[in-house]
Amino acid sequence: MIKSNLKHILDSQGNDISIRELARELDCQFETIRRFYNDTMERYPRDLIDKLCKYLNVTPGQLLVYVPSSE
């Protein structure tokens, strides 16, 4: 399973930016950033991954993590 690590990254970097402000900074819809942050997104748009990686100075492998399912 692929999971979003956005919440952890924002918390660990000490960013006091809200997800609403992040959406504004990246020129993205708030709902899209909210779903990414809360790990409820079903598909991850490549352009958004690119914007987040550049803005947060992280790699896609840091932003999205693989967690093996327990099936």
Image: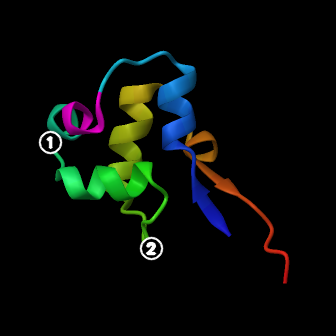
* Camera-nearest label, 2 or 1: 2
Q: Secondary structure at mark 2?
A: loop
Judge from the rendering whether residue 16 lies leftward or rightward of residue 25; answer left or right: right
Q: Quadrant of the N terminus?
A: bottom right
Kindly report the distance in space between the C-alpha atoms of the residues bearing marks 2 and 1. Answer: 20 Å
Q: Residue furthest bottom?
A: 71
Residue 27 — which label?
A: 1
Q: Position of residue 31 (x, y in %)?
A: 23, 57
Would you place residue 7 above or below residue 21 in this image? below
Q: Position of residue 64 (x, y in %)?
A: 58, 51
Among numbered discs 2 and 1, the one appearing first in the sequence: 1
Q: Residue at x 41, y 18 (%)?
A: 15
Q: Residue at x 36, y 59 (%)?
A: 35
Circle 1 residues within 10 Å: few <14, some 14–19, many ≥20: few
Q: Position of residue 45 (x, y in %)?
A: 36, 62
Q: Position of residue 41 (x, y in %)?
A: 42, 66
Q: Nearer the viewer, residue 64 or 20?
A: 20
Q: Quadrant of the C terminus?
A: bottom right
In this orientation, does residue 58 appear? no
What's the image's color scheme? rainbow
Would you place residue 33 above or below residue 53 in this image? below
Q: Is residue 56 magenta?
A: no
Judge from the rendering whether residue 33 lies leftward or rightward of residue 36; answer left or right: left
Residue 70 — which label?
A: none
Residue extent of the magenta highlight: 18-22
Judge from the rendering whether residue 4 lies leftward or rightward of residue 18; answer left or right: right
Residue type, mark 1 in image:
Asp
Would you place residue 70 above or below residue 54 in this image? below
Q: Is residue 21 magenta?
A: yes
Residue type, mark 2 in image:
Glu
For label 2, the residue is 42
Q: Nearer the viewer, residue 25 or 70?
A: 70
